[in-house]
Image (cartoon, grey):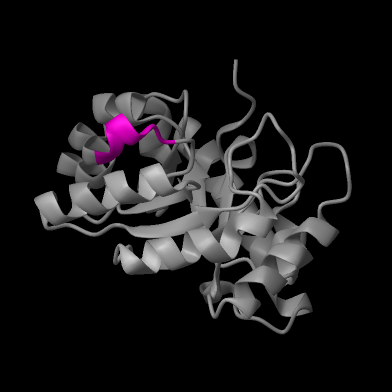
Amino acid sequence: MIEDDAAARLTAVRAEIARAAATAGRKADDVSLIAVSKTHDAPAIRPLIAAGQRHFGENRVQEAEAKWPALRDETSDLVLHLVGQLQSNKAEAAVALFDAIHSVDRPSLIAALARAMDKAGRRPYCFVQVNIGGEPQKGGCPVADLPTLLAGARVADLPVAGLMAVPPLDVEAAPYFALLAKLARDHGLSGLSMGMSGDYRTAVTLGASHVRVGTALFGDRT
């Protein structure tokens, strides 16, 4: 029953992505669906893996370390994304575990990741997080600082795939997604990590390459 529910939710989200992509003249295959599995344990994750989901997102390094090595032993082609804030002292652990890091937002983290990647001989691709709404409680670099941060990331040879943002809550997300897309174009970047359970359809119509969906796939968190 749990497996059937997971498969149904996954099918529904993929169908919504396909509809939104078609509206924008895009292909559904151009959008990577990241199932955000933070706070969910392995028994809750396995049904989605069985249904064919391969990209998963976690907010915290320590939580991911506790559950993903075993899951990867069971299924070898999983792709793991760090979508939460990253402390510089966790850079080595993040580089060892994750295939993509979506929250690069300051020079000190760039330096820590560059050292960790050089040491590990492993280079997860990165998104620079932009504080698109200028909210003091959120991570991400200010819009005005983005050119300098991207320049620093390139000097450090970080593999920057694109930009990431979380719009303010309870407002229309479209203008923020459109701004992030413009910033990416201005800097020659094609990757856009934007959109969550409540607004991923809008994000897809505005060019998202990665959407980070939790509740719509796992149900409400307790």
In percent of width and height, residue 198 lies at: 75, 44
- Decide: is 122 above or below 42: below
In percent of width and height, residue 87 lies at: 39, 32
69 or 48: which is nearer to us? 69
Q: Residue at x 29, y 30 (%)?
A: 89
Which quarter of the picture shows residue 208? Answer: bottom right
State the residue lying farthest toward the bottom.
25
144 or 36: which is nearer to us? 144
The reply to whether residue 51 is visible in this rendering is no
In percent of width and height, residue 139 lies at: 59, 38
Q: Which residues are magenta?
A: 86-91
Quarter of the rendering occupied by the C terminus: top right
Q: Is residue 154 left or right of residue 134?
A: left
Prevalent SS, magenta region: helix
Q: Is residue 88 magenta?
A: yes
In percent of width and height, residue 5 lies at: 55, 37
